[in-house]
Image (tube, rainbow, N blue to C red):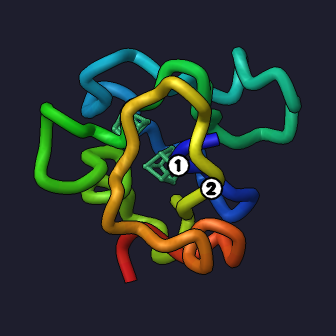
C-alpha cells in the first residue's frame, strides 16, 4: 500500500483530481465495491516529487479518512513516516 482511503469516506470527490499520478478511483471503480473512493497502491507515490504532503489527504474534508499504509516495494514513499505509523494506519492529516 501507500496511503489508503478508509471506510469513513463520504465519496465527495475532493481528492481525485488532486492526485498527480491518477492513483485514485471513485466508488464506481472501487474493486472492493464498498461505496468509498480507492487508492491503487501500485500507482501511489505518496506525492513524492509532487507535493510537500499527500495532496489527497490535504483536500479531504473527512477527518482521519486517509491513512498511511505499508510501503509498496519499488514505489516512491516518504522515508520520514515510521513503520509504526504505517502499521497503525495513522491518519495522514492528524
Ligand atoms: S498520496 Fe499523492 S500520489 Fe498517493 S493517492 Fe494521494 S494524491 Fe495520489
Ligand atoms: S476527499 Fe476524502 S471523503 Fe472525499 S472522496 Fe476523497 S477520501 Fe473520500
Q: Which of the pair 51/86 is nearer the observer?
A: 86
Label whose residue precedes the other's in the sequence (2 or 1): 1
Place of residue 15 in the rendered image (x, y in percent of width and height, measured from the top left): 37, 40
Residue at the location (26% across, 58% down)?
58
State the count of labels: 2
Place of residue 31 in the rendered image (x, y in percent of width and height, measured from the top left): 82, 21
Residue at the location (30% across, 50% down)?
54
Is the distance from the Cβ of mark 1 to the nearest ligand 1 atom less than 8 Å? Answer: yes
Q: Is residue 4 left or right of residue 46?
A: right
Dividing the picture into quarters, in which one does residue 34 lie? top right
Residue at the location (44% across, 37% down)?
13
Dividing the picture into quarters, in which one does residue 21 lie? top left
Q: Quadrant of the C terminus?
A: bottom left
Mark 1 = which residue? 3
Q: Are marks 2 and 1 in contact (CB under 8 Å)?
A: yes
Q: Give the answer, above or below, for where 11 lies relative to 82.
A: above
Judged from the image, the secondary structure of the residue bearing numbered disc 2 is loop
Q: Give the answer, above or below, for where 72 lies relative to 28.
A: below
Q: Give the answer, above or below, for where 11 lies relative to 73.
A: below
Residue at the location (61% across, 79% down)?
84
Judged from the image, the secondary structure of the residue bearing numbered disc 1 is strand
Place of residue 65 in the rendered image (x, y in percent of width and height, measured from the top left): 56, 65
Q: Residues within 10 Å of mark 1 (few under 14, many from 20)?
A: many
Q: Residues within 10 Å of mark 2 (few under 14, many from 20)?
A: many
Q: Is residue 36 left or right of residue 54?
A: right
Q: Which of the pair 10/79 is nearer the observer?
A: 79
Q: Is residue 31 left or right of residue 10?
A: right
Mark 2 = which residue? 69
Amino acid at each position: 500500500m501507500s496511503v489508503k482511503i478508509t471506510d469513513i469516506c463520504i465519496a465527495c470527490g475532493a481528492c481525485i483530481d488532486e492526485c498527480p499520478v491518477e492513483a485514485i478511483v471513485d466508488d464506481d471503480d472501487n474493486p472492493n465495491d464498498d461505496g468509498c473512493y480507492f487508492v491503487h497502491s501500485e500507482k501511489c507515490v505518496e506525492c513524492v516529487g509532487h507535493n510537500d504532503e499527500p495532496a489527497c489527504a490535504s483536500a479531504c474534508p473527512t477527518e482521519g479518512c486517509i491513512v498511511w499504509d505499508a510501503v509498496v516495494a519499488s514505489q516512491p514513499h516518504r522515508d520520514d513516516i515510521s513503520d509504526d505509523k504505517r502499521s497503525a494506519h495513522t491518519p495522514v492529516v492528524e
